Image (spheres, rainbow, N blue to C red):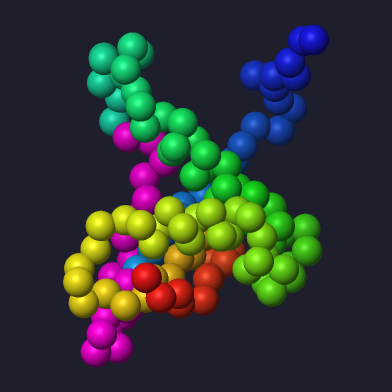
Amino acid sequence: VIPKWNFFAPTPGVVNFHLLYRDVLENGTVGYWKEIEFGKKRIYVAAIWNPDKRSRKALFDLTISIAQAVEDTGNQEFIKISTPYLTILNYLSNLPRSNISVATQFTIIQTSIDQEKPISLFLSDSHRV
């Protein structure tokens, strides 16, 4: 009946995860990485009207699921047929893009105060869009 909330967890989150994607163009050129922002700058009206909140939270949770699967199993082939992978791929494939884009690819990057450089946790295959 009472939800389990860990406001004061013994080990608070110390890492950040970033979801980036890039497109492959018709001529084979690979574009620059673009980051999907999970949290946008808050505005006052967001307390009342924030229709994107749930989709950003869902995307963040899917990213965390893949990062956790990488840590738990390390089985890249299993991850590539998982629901989180396919859902992120579907989301990214439906983003507006140039007419000359033929494929997309995404990566999950981990950053932390303790790390000097970002760590690439996962790199997807290129998928036709």
Residue 70 sits in quarter: bottom right
**Residue under the point 28% across and 70% down:** 32
* Residue positioned 72% across, 68% down in the render: 78
- Does the rendering let one see residue 124? yes
The C terminus, quarter of image: bottom left
x then y, percent, for residue 92: 40, 58
Task: Please state, as top left, top right, bottom left or bottom right, where the N terminus lies in the image.
Answer: top right
Query: In the image as oriented, which residue stretches furthest toward the left?
Result: 99
Q: Position of residue 40 (x, y in %)?
A: 32, 34
Q: Residue at x 32, y 60 (%)?
A: 34
**SS assignment for the magenta stretch, majority:** loop
Q: Is residue 124 magenta?
A: no
* Residue segment shown in magenta: 23-40
Q: Quadrant of residue 48?
A: top left
- Horizontal relation, residue 57 to residue 20: left or right: right
Q: Report which quarter residue 100 is drawn in.
A: bottom left
Magenta-span inclusion, residue 25: yes
The correct choice, above or below, for 57 with respect to 105 in the image is above
Q: Could you tell me if residue 118 is visible in this image?
A: no
User: Left or right of 41: which side holds 122?
Assistant: right
